[in-house]
Image: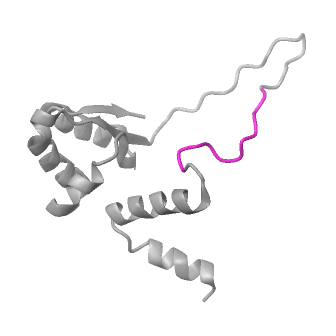
Amino acid sequence: MSAVNEILEKLKTLTLLEASELVSKIEETFGVDASAPAGGAVMMAPVAAGGAEAAPKEEEKTLFDVVLEEIPTDKKVAIYKVVRSIANIAVNQVKEFTATLPKALKESVSKEEAETAKQQLEDAGAKVKIV
């Protein structure tokens, strides 16, 4: 098995908290920002005949991320319970998981699942957005 495949298999076993810690370590070690867009190339819209820009075909988004933006101090306990439930992490991992915000709590989920998670978090007092 190649080194790349071995690493990939190990990544598949990480918890959400461990994956988050790994991203932080990679950012520190290699001086990169995982939130920055890859490639860095600027895409230009094609120009249609007559000089007007062609309108890009807009695809309907089907997968969404639920991003926890803020946890008010007086609502931490209630929000931690919801975060634990949504992220499926242990009680002792919630505080560390939410230490740096904003943070994606759920990624690439359906609109319905994202809306449900957002509503649960907002009901507990958190500031949340769906992207």
The quarter in which the N terminus is drawn is: bottom right
Residue lying at 58% horizontally and 43% vertically, measured from the top left:
36
Residue lying at 54% horizontally and 50% vertically, measured from the top left:
34
Q: Is residue 118 left or right of residue 1?
A: left
Q: Is residue 2 left or right of residue 96?
A: right
Give the answer, above or below, for where 58 lies relative to 107.
above
The quarter in which the C terminus is drawn is: top left
Report if residue 41 lies within the magenta region: yes
Report if residue 8 lies within the magenta region: no
Percent of width and height locating residue 61: 49, 35
Rendered image quadrant of residue 66: top left
Which of the pair 46/124 is nearer the observer? Answer: 124
Which of the pair 14/100 is nearer the observer? Answer: 100
Q: Identify the coloring.
A: one colour
Percent of width and height locating residue 32: 60, 52
Which of the pair 78/33 is nearer the observer? Answer: 33
Q: Is residue 54 left or right of residue 101?
A: right
Which of the pair 20/88 is nearer the observer? Answer: 20
How many dots with numbers? 0
Percent of width and height locating residue 121: 20, 37
Percent of width and height locating residue 39: 71, 47
Magenta range is: 34-44
Residue lying at 9% horizontally and 42% vertically, measured from the top left:
78
